Image: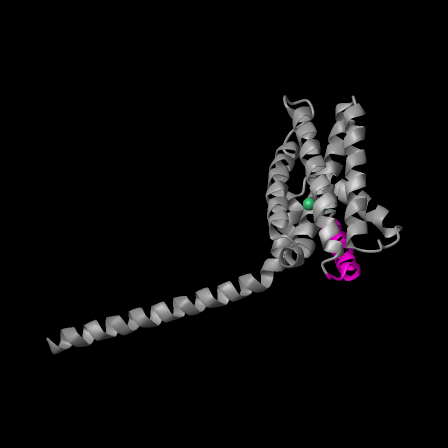
Amino acid sequence: MAQRTKTKSRTSSRKKATTRSTARRKTTRSASAKRASPRKSTAARRRAVPPAIAKAAREMSKMMEGQPAPSDAIALLEKDHREVEAMFETFEKLESKAEKAKLAAKICLSLTVHTTIEEEILYPPAHKKIEHDLVDEAIVEHNGAKQLIAEIEAMKPSEHLYDAKVKVLSEYVKHHVKEEQNEMFPQLRSSGIDLRKLGAQLMERKAELLAAMGGKA
Ligand SMILES: [Fe+2]
Ligand SMILES: [Fe+2]
């Protein structure tokens, strides 16, 4: 009986030691995985960016280099709005499928970067300082646009509904831009938020995102 108890206790100690050592291995692995994760996620993002989008990102990044910094956050965002509106207008006139694919990639990229910098840098302070319903609605509208962007990026211009999706995206964006410029931006102007500082942050993040999507980061 005493022998059985000893054996049981030895087995139990071995089990505990094994559990401890497995836990240590898991901790070590998860710590090193955490350390490696930023590099891994950048590489994963690079792999996930379609070549047409990566090329558009490099072109946009190059264009940004020679441009003067915008006076503030609103100036930067309104400039983005005008640029994407112009691209949608050009898209409507295009006949060539190759040109449509190239421009759609640029439109999708611009909107992805624009919505990301708004959500990361502008909307959080705006939510605290202005009518928060406006900001909440803007986030929901972004989500609708992102869904269409993902569908367009996964399609070819020869596919059924491609043009219709780009058209509906342009209408979404037109509506959203109107609300930002007519309702959100005037409230931001009198909110006390430092729009010059925010403008510099938006610009910096935009350059960073373009570099990452273009494969430079
Ligand atoms: Fe916007
Ligand atoms: Fe927006």
- Where is residue 64 drawn, in percent x and y? 84, 49
Ligand 2 shows up in the quarter that is top right
Which sits in the foreground, 27 or 184?
A: 184
* In the rendered image, the vertical position of residue 18 relative to residue 155, given as above or below: below
Which sits in the foreground, 51 or 203?
A: 203
Name the residue at 12% across, 78% down: 2
- Where is residue 50 drawn, in percent x and y? 68, 39
Name the residue at 49% across, 67% down: 28
Name the residue at 67% across, 27% down: 156
* In the rendered image, the vertical position of residue 35 relative to residue 71, given as above or below: below
Queried whether the magenta region covers residue 204, the answer comes back as yes
Q: Quadrant of the N terminus?
A: bottom left
Task: Count numbered badges in the picture.
Answer: 0
- Where is residue 14 drawn, in percent x and y? 30, 71
Q: Quadrant of residue 124?
A: bottom right
Can residue 149 be seen here? yes
Can residue 109 be seen here? no
Which sits in the foreground, 166 or 52?
A: 166
Q: Quadrant of the C terminus?
A: bottom right
Q: Quadrant of residue 8?
A: bottom left
Residue range corresponding to the magenta coloring? 192-212
- Where is residue 197 drawn, in percent x and y? 77, 62
- Determine whether, in the image, residue 36 is placed left or right of residue 25: right
* In the rendered image, the vertical position of residue 45 relative to residue 101, given as above or below: below
Name the residue at 73% across, 44% down: 182
- Determine whether, in the image, residue 11 is placed left or right of residue 76: left
- The chief SS type of the magenta part is helix
- Determine whether, in the image, residue 5 is placed left or right of residue 44: left
Queried whether the magenta region covers residue 15, the answer comes back as no
* In the rendered image, the vertical position of residue 71 relative to residue 16, given as above or below: above
- Determine whether, in the image, residue 64 is placed left or right of residue 213: right
